[in-house]
Amino acid sequence: MRIVDITREPVELYKILKFESMANSGGQAKLFIDDGLVKVNGEVETRKRKKIVSGDVIELFDEVLQVQLVAATQSTPKPSHTKATEPPPAPRKKRQLLKPFKG
């Protein structure tokens, strides 16, 4: 059994199959579900957008996944730049317009 960490719930069933490389694409994941090849908590699941939550067990072929919720990691804030510290914009050059050719 493989543990799958999610940072929010619920997550749609086909997305877990896709992101855990149990299916090559979302379309293939949906086909597996339509064909009745996927079990959730021991029962065949045919809803592609079945909401998966922490504790659910997903089976496809010989692979078994258990989903668990983990706290999202917080990224370090990027330094903010204020207008006072930014250099002034460079002056724009005026473009000379060309007159249309009269032949």
Image (cartoon, rainbow, N blue to C red):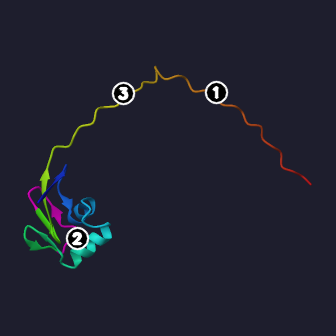
Query: Which amino acid type corresponds to the residue marked 2 in the rendered image?
Result: Lys
**Which residue appears at 26% of the width and 70% of the height?**
29
SS under mark 1: loop
Residue 53, by quadrant, is: bottom left
**Residue at 72% from the left image edge and 33% from the top image edge:** 94
Q: Main secondary structure of the magenta part?
A: loop
On whether residue 103 falls in the magenta region, the answer is no
x, y percent for residue 63: 16, 66
In the image, which disc is placed on residue 48? Answer: 2
Farthest bottom residue in view: 35
Disc on res. 79: 3
- Which numbered disc flags the more N-terminal residue, 1 or 3? 3
Percent from the top left, x then y, of residue 54?
11, 55
Could you tell me which quadrant the C terminus lies in?
bottom right
Q: Which residues are magenta?
A: 46-56
Residue 37 sits above or below residue 51 on the image: below
> Which of the pair 54/83 is nearer the observer?
54
Q: Nearer the viewer, mark 1 or mark 3?
A: 3
Residue 39, x across and y down, in percent: 13, 71
**Closest to the observer, 21 or 69:** 21
